[in-house]
Image (cartoon, rainbow, N blue to C red):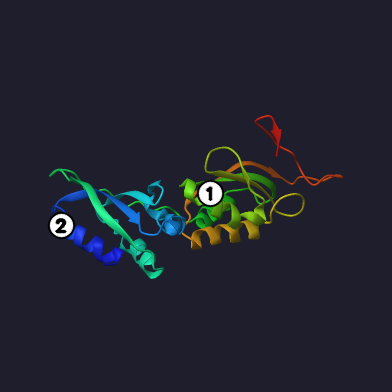
Amino acid sequence: MTLCEQWREIEAGLPDDWSEAGVTLVVAEDDRADQAALMLGPLSPGRTGSTFRLQVRRGGDPRRVFARLDSEGIRGRIDVVGAAERSADAAPEPLRRSRLLAEQWDERIASLPDDWSDLYAEVELDSSDFLQRGALLLAPANPAHYGGPTTLRFRCARVSGYGVAPSMARRCFERLDAESITGRFRILHVLSATSHVATQGPVWHVGGRSV
């Protein structure tokens, strides 16, 4: 039975007024657990080996994620471990989705002065399972694992100097989005109209180190 079929059976057996269900997904082949972790990213799972713990909200519809796993031939078993019922006077919670990183990039860059020249930024990934693959996809930006357990930092130079070009940085985020790697993008420091005199650009001192 496919994962989608298992979920349909589980969903049909939940109370009519269920609001949230806790489920476990055990991947049949241990060597495919890392691949499954990447695809399960939008559901923000907890993980122990090849076992994943998911909290599914009513209306969240995880079938799209399970369908991707099915299409890749990843087999497993889904079990429900608990379900919470919505109280009669509780309003339904709006569905919250992680925003695409490329969209976050566009919004932050649009807020900068027109003459910005250098910035130091970070992306905090939503899961440690994203870290290795995320660092690989961000490789053109020369990311550093610094600032948090799932945080990658990098420099960007708009015109010249040390740092990835803005167009390449955005392309890296598009690559993360394409693999459903989610997170939050922040600009930590920004400078405008810098003049690089016999240097590759400004140096920031963060936590006692130069970046």
Percent x, y for residue 198?
A: 87, 45
> Which corner quadrant of the image does residue 119 belong to?
top right
Type of amino acid at the residue the image marks with label 1: Leu
Percent x, y for residue 142?
A: 67, 51
Residue at point 36% right, 61% down? Answer: 65
Helix, strand or loop for disc 2: helix
Reading the image, the residue beneath label 2 is 13
Q: How many marks?
A: 2
Q: In front: 79, or 45? A: 79
Type of amino acid at the residue the image marks with label 2: Gly
Reading the image, the residue beneath label 1 is 131
Residue at point 75% right, 41% down? Answer: 202
Farthest-out residue, right:
198
Q: In front: 63, or 37? A: 37
Numbered mark located on residue 64 in the image: none
In the displayed structure, does residue 27 sit left or right of residue 113? left
Between discs 2 and 1, the one toward the N terminus: 2
Farthest-out residue, top:
208
Residue at point 44% right, 59% down? Answer: 32
Q: CA distance from mark 2 to mark 1?
A: 36 Å
Quarter of the C terminus within the rendering: top right
Quarter of the N terminus within the rendering: bottom left
Crowding around mark 2 (Cα neighbors within 10 Å: few <14, some 14 to 19, many 20+) is: few
Crowding around mark 1 (Cα neighbors within 10 Å: few <14, some 14 to 19, many 20+) is: some
Q: In front: 52, or 201? A: 52
Farthest-out residue, bottom:
71
In the displayed structure, does residue 27 sit left or right of residue 201? left
Helix, strand or loop for disc 1: helix
Percent x, y for residue 199?
A: 83, 44
> Which corner quadrant of the image does residue 195 belong to?
top right
Q: In front: 43, or 35? A: 35
